[in-house]
Amino acid sequence: MSTQNISTIIVTGGAGYIGSHTIIELLQQTSYNIVSIDNFSNSNKDTFDRIKAITGKNIVNYNVDICHLEALEKTISQIENPIGIIHFAAFKSVPQSVAEPLLYYHNNLGSLINILKICQKFHISHFIFSSSCSVYGNVEKLPVTEQTPFSNAESPYAQTKQMGEEIVTNFAKSQSGFNSVLLRYFNPVGAHPSGLNGEYPRSKPDNLVPYITQTAIGILQKLTVFGGDYDTRDGSCIRDYIHVSDIADAHVKALNYLIDHKQKKSTSIFNLGTGNGVSVLEAVHSFEKVTQQKLNYEVGPRRAGDVINIYANNDLVKKELNWDPKYDLDEMMLSAWKWQLNLANEKNS
């Protein structure tokens, strides 16, 4: 089939964890031409082979640093009929952002500003921004709704998401015909149900679930649960874990929402979570139960930048996007383990 005259959706960070799963859903649910922009600063080139194994389709990726506007403009000028951008590309490690704040402000905000300049120059009117529940900080009232006021950001990473949302909102107000959705992810975990694609950290993972699976398979010696003395039911932090394929599905629904002109204002905001708070220790025990693997873990000191307790009210996204998460915690853990075993088999074959 010729791609001529077919509308194109650009996915920045398309080789990343959430970006790659969203590309899979876009390929399976839509007829758009999908193009990725990813410079592999924290992702792997073989991700596109994994996407092809699942979908049977090749993805064109442009290896460009989005912080370089001139190179980005040259790339976009080669893309046929771009009508929307889903912007994932950003650094996302909370501890790294605490240690290297300038790196985060430069990369996460500089790349976003460049992408919005591209939207303006090439008249790309639909934009989805990858945000985070970290924008809320430590809140007094749970669950959080989209109207929950922001507390102080607990890390420079979280602050780049707060500022990023403001930048997108103000830009959208200034541009006739431009519309945007801000998706505030809670804690994406798990892997594609096939076990062929999942979270693939280039270095030692910062996120809980890859740390669990790498400990279980013997890559890492032990898991440290950061903090056992929080004011929660078992002393560990509480999060709203959500399957990455559910997150990816929400992006397809958000894109259709914009393209079908269903949005009520220039920028719409949605929480993406299950609505259930799960403690870190409960997540560990779920993994042990569904995989029959005994984890070597210990409870250690608190970690800088961590929010104590956060989970979503997801009523708005269910109503507006007709989205409902499909996967429960046990399925999230089982899919992550399936992916880890698949990686191990690849390495040994």
Image: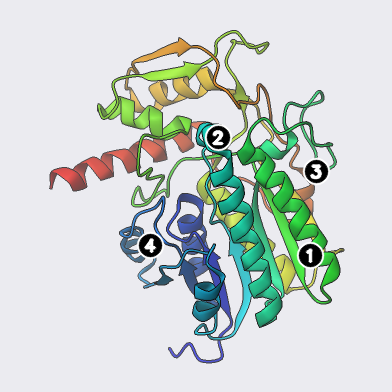
Q: Which residue is mark 3?
A: 146
Name the residue at the top extreme: 229
Q: Which-is-in-front pick, marks 1 and 4?
A: 1
**Viewed as shown, does residue 185 lie left or right of 280?**
right
**Of the pair 330 and 96, the residue shown nearer to us:** 96
User: Closer to the N terminus: mark 3 or mark 4?
Assistant: 4
For disc 2, the marked residue is 94
Of the numbered discs 2 and 1, the one sitting upstream in the chain is 2
Spatial CA distance of label 2 from label 4 is: 28 Å
Q: Which residue is mark 4?
A: 51
Type of the residue with mark 3: Glu
Q: Amino acid at mark 4?
A: Ile
Assign a secondary structure to mark 1.
helix
Name the secondary structure under disc 2: helix
x, y percent for residue 310:
68, 29
Q: Earlier in the sequence, mark 1 or mark 4?
A: 4
Question: Label 3: few (<14), some or many (≥20) within 10 Å?
Answer: some
